[in-house]
Image (spheres, grey):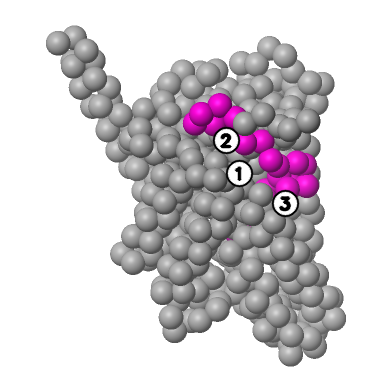
Amino acid sequence: MATPPPPPGQLQRRLGVVDSTAIGLGSMLGAGVFVVFSPAAALAGPLLTLAVAVAGVVAYCNAVASAQLAAKYPSSGGTYVYGRRQLGEWPGFIAGWGFVTGKTASCAAMALTFGQYLAPGFATPVAVAAVVVLTGVNLLGITRTALLTKVLLAMVLATIAFVAAAALTGPHPAAGAAAAGTADGQNAWGVLPAAGLMFFAFAGYARIATLGEEVKDPGRTIPRAILGALGGAFLIYMGLAALLQWHLPPAQLAGSTAPLLDAVTSSRLSPGAPLVQAGAAAACLGALLALITGVGRTAMAMARERDLPAPLARVGGAHTVPYAAELTVAAAVIVLLLSTNVLTVVGFSSFGVLVYYAVTNAAAFTLRARPWHAPRWLNVLGFLGCLLLAVTLPPGSALGMAAVLAAGAAGRFLVLRRRRKAAAE
């Protein structure tokens, strides 16, 4: 029996558990493996694995809350929709605005990282070309997006396995050198800001929730995909953190711009360094593909509620995609690539995403029907954890994103006042 077409303006349910999990895991690995370990190690020192564990606990709380809400509200937009339905328009707007702005900057960072790995002398033009090509893939439909994500994810997992083998073969710094100079009280204070940066790497499962309108059997598929992607990423991050600290001297790990590449070049498997560069490029492409998809869907959901310009809600084409939102996100990313230094946005994005998940936990707390594995205290822990990690991020990142959130709130307030005045007249 043929599947009936979706109502006008709605997306089609095409994604199963495997596709959804791949999109979430591809988002996390692209960001975390090749971007976050070094700045986190510079803050946490020998306590890097503890920082990963703290970020993982907060991410688990958020994942459970997201799974609960996505099963109840299986539509595009993620926490923007959940916040509006459970808490009110303003919390939903803050979550959606933080996600769209923070993740648009993340798209630019991922694109430029891809360009620097592939062609360092032409990083920006290559990054722009990547955005154009991947936006074209997204416009071909969500099943094409999922297929390419799985191909890129396979390349990334093979690269990580090779890096792990290189780290195991050594040589390794002496045990005393590995702990020297960094095992003081200062690093204990660095665990929380390091965990805040590492949280940037765990945020990929949000893409699964933002695609809720395109998932088959969302009540079953979304929770399994979110928890599966998070569990896989957590095991990989913990393993890599331990291996990198064992294999690289602390100063080299903290100051590296490409720690996984350094792990290979410092090992007996150094001839395989080009494989790591190719894997890094694939990881960045996978993360960028999923990011553009998720931001476009959230922008579409906000436009449906008139929190963004209404034309962004348009859905159409042979493959039923939110083409207006996708093209607008791509244009914004290209503008950032051509006008700013976007490799400084990891903390900026982390702050926005932590605010997003604080709203997620608050919304989940209000749910009455709850599975046994999602008690209310888990929502409280997630909410407080998000706020704690957000306020302990580097001040420039926190203040910058706070200013963006305030500007968005002020703009919405003025638009609403103008609408009320027009209605009264």
Front residue of 425 and 58:
425
Start-end of magenta stretch:
6-32
In the rendered image, residue 215, in percent from the top left (x then y), is placed at: 68, 36
- Relative to 271, 75 lies left or right: left
| Other-residue count near label 1 (Cα within 10 Å), few / some / many at <14 / 14–19 / ≥20 | many
In which quarter of the view is residue 147 placed? bottom right
Front residue of 328 and 107:
328
- Mark 2 = which residue? 11
SS at circle 3: helix
Q: Measuring 74% from the left and 21% from the top, which residue is drawn there? A: 375
- Residue 63 visible here: no
**Quarter placement of the C terminus:** top left
Kindly indicate whether the residue at mark 2 contacts the one at mark 3 (C-beta within 8 angstroms): no
The CA span between labels 3 and 1 is 10 Å
Q: Eyeballing the image, is 322 above or below 70?
A: below
Find out whether residue 341 is within the magenta segment: no
Q: Residue furthest top?
A: 424
**Quarter placement of the N terminus:** top right
| Other-residue count near label 2 (Cα within 10 Å), few / some / many at <14 / 14–19 / ≥20 | many
The circle drawn on residue 22 is 3
In the rendered image, residue 179, in percent from the top left (x then y), is placed at: 72, 70
Kindly indicate whether the residue at mark 1 contacts the one at mark 2 (C-beta within 8 angstroms): no
Q: Residue furthest left?
A: 425
In the rendered image, residue 295, in percent from the top left (x then y), is placed at: 49, 45
Q: Eyeballing the image, is 200 above or below 62?
A: below
Q: Earlier in the sequence, mark 2 or mark 1?
A: 2
- Mark 1 = which residue? 207
- Numbered disc in front, either 2 or 1: 2
| Amino acid at dot 2 | Leu
Q: Eyeballing the image, is 323 above or below 332?
A: above
- Relative to 379, 391 lies left or right: left
